[in-house]
């Protein structure tokens, strides 16, 4: 099972056409705030194979939901083993 990728919002640039702009992209990792909402520390997340971007301050609800689903899948796979 591969770890999920973080999703972040792209900045709005005035020189881009609105129909060509993509609103979101994959990020370098999850922010510390997102990890704290799920109940993980940075060291625990890195042991699970998750990337952590310590520079990012934003907390996106989509990423929190991704982390919750990932942790549920881990618990289910460990209980089967």
Image: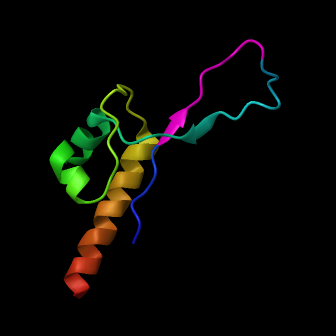
> Is residue 46 depicted above or below 7 in this figure?
below
Q: Is residue 4 left or right of residue 38?
A: right
Which residue is rendered at x = 78% and y = 20% of the image? 16
Q: Is residue 48 left or right of residue 63?
A: left
Residue 41 visible in rendering: no
> Is residue 41 depicted above or below 23 in this figure?
below
Q: Residue 61 versus residue 42: which sits nearer the camera?
A: 42
Q: Main secondary structure of the magenta part?
A: loop
User: In the image, is residue 10 part of the stretch drawn in magenta?
Assistant: yes
Which residue is rendered at x = 22% and y = 39% of the image? 36
> Which corner quadrant of the image does residue 61 belong to?
top left
Q: Which residues are magenta?
A: 7-15
> Is residue 39 depicted above or below 24 in this figure?
below
- The structure's colour scheme is rainbow
Q: Quadrant of the N terminus?
A: bottom left
Q: How many marks?
A: 0
Q: Position of residue 43 (x, y in %)?
A: 16, 48
Residue 36 visible in rendering: yes
Q: Is residue 39 left or right of residue 5?
A: left
Q: Position of residue 46 (x, y in %)?
A: 24, 52
Furthest-bottom residue in view? Answer: 81
Q: Residue 34 versus residue 51: which sits nearer the camera?
A: 51
Which residue is rendered at x = 79% and y = 24% of the image? 18
Q: Position of residue 81 (x, y in %)?
A: 22, 87
> Which corner quadrant of the image does residue 11 belong to?
top right
């Amino acid at each position: 099972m591969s770890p999920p990728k973080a999703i972040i919002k792209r900045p709005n640039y005035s020189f881009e056409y609105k129909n060509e702009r993509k609103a979101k992209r994959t990020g370098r990792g999850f922010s510390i705030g997102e990890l704290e909402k799920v109940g993980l520390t940075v060291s625990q997340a890195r042991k699970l194979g998750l990337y952590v971007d310590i520079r990012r301050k934003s907390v996106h609800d989509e990423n929190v939901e991704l982390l919750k689903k990932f942790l549920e899948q881990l618990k289910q796979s460990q209980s089967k083993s």
